Image (cartoon, rainbow, N blue to C red):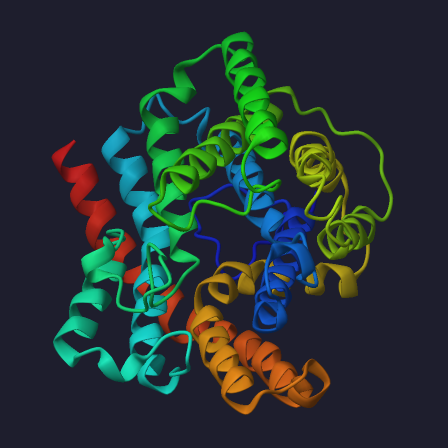
Amino acid sequence: MSTSKPAAAFSNTKPHYPILDGLRGVAALTVVCFHLFEAFATSHLDQKINHGYLAVDFFFILSGFVMGYAYDDRWKTMTVTEFVTRRFIRLHPMVVIGAVIGAVLFYFQGCATWDVSQVSVPSLLVATLINAFLIPATPGFEIRGVGEMFPLNGPSWSLLFEYIGNLGYALFLRKLSTNALAIVVLLAGFGLAAFAILGPYGDICVGFSLTGENIIGGSLRLLFAFPAGLLLSRVFNPVPVKGAFWIGSLAIGILSALPRMGGSEHLWMNGLYDTFCVVILFPVLIYLGASGKTTDQLSTRICRFLGDISYPLYMVHYPFIYWYYAWVKNENLTFPQSLPGAVALVMGSILLAYGCLKLYDEPVRRFLTKRLLRVSKTVR
């Protein structure tokens, strides 16, 4: 494993797994492409990059793996308060900037699906505030009107679940024996499979709304994926593997892009596919990615760049998806007609993510690290 650290790493963290960083970036790119095609889908049944939503489960498993690797052996000298502070510093600056970008672009996103002209500036400011604090929007505060927890920046929902997973790790999961953790993973896996195969949607593209099915499904996604990653970190023993980054990237791309299984008459088939990806294939990909090594400068640089932009890209792209969606609907465009805008959105989101990383995220995290962690250690 390379010991070089990506730009997002702090000096007091362990060396990163560079290939896992790269695969996280590839998964973030699939999310952007998945969201692009929402403008042309009538439902989940006909959306292109059909299974791009599974990237969230990949993120959750990877997060559990990284938590176990980075923190399992540090609890004799680290308090829960310090851990939560570290996670807040790592995650929250991008939550805030995502909400701000969503607010700035909100009045440019008007279309028949959501009439932004009816939303007052005070309502927008309240929505920005609750999004920045990761407070889910109840129906009275959901200013877009499509039922999202975070109507200014939809993907923020997964950060709320990420916080819950981190807190669950600090308070409970880290204390479990490996056998007990395996039982949790097994039971949660059965629960997730039951929801995916027997549930109302035939998929696990849920968690972004306050409806009962979304809360149950989103909770099951987290309850399996995060402990599964943690369990994987405990039993991990590297195996020889060549080309792990390229194998993993190709696999993520193919698994995300495959068409919907079973159509509307056999929803269980797609649920079975989702379950197989999340429960079997994603842990295998993470295991291979953690086992592999970057062996040349090109792959090392690609993995480092993708790892650096992965989280910022995930958190800044969606306000532009709303804008793109409105443009497509207002102009009644086909995808080929909108292709220049789609390319500009993807490339612009990558550039914005990198700019936010260098000019905002890293400086803010350095500032918060000096202030908050110093206070945390002083009061311990």
Locate residue 8, reporting x and y percent. 48, 58
**Residue at x 79%, y 49% (from the top left corner):** 251
Q: Is residue 112 above or below residue 178?
A: below
Locate residue 122, reporting x and y percent. 12, 75
Left or right? Give the position of 86 relative to 241.
left
Left or right? Give the position of 38 relative to 175.
right
**Residue at x 64%, y 87% (from the top left corner):** 338
Residue 342 in which image quadrant: bottom right
Left or right? Give the position of 210 relative to 213.
left
Q: Is residue 186 above or below residue 288?
A: above
**Residue at x 54%, y 16% (from the top left corner):** 187
Q: Can residue 347 be seen?
A: yes
Which image quarter holds the C terminus? top left
Q: Which one is in front, 107 or 140?
A: 140
Q: Which one is in front, 201 or 339?
A: 201
Locate residue 231, reporting x and y percent. 57, 22
Q: Is residue 355 above or below residue 93?
A: below
Q: Can residue 304 be seen?
A: no
**Residue at x 42%, y 42% (from the top left corner):** 214
Q: How many marks?
A: 0
Q: Is residue 156 above or below residue 358?
A: above
Left or right? Give the position of 36 relative to 226.
right
Which image quarter holds the N terminus? top right
Residue 300 in which image quadrant: bottom right
Locate residue 242, reporting x and y percent. 87, 44
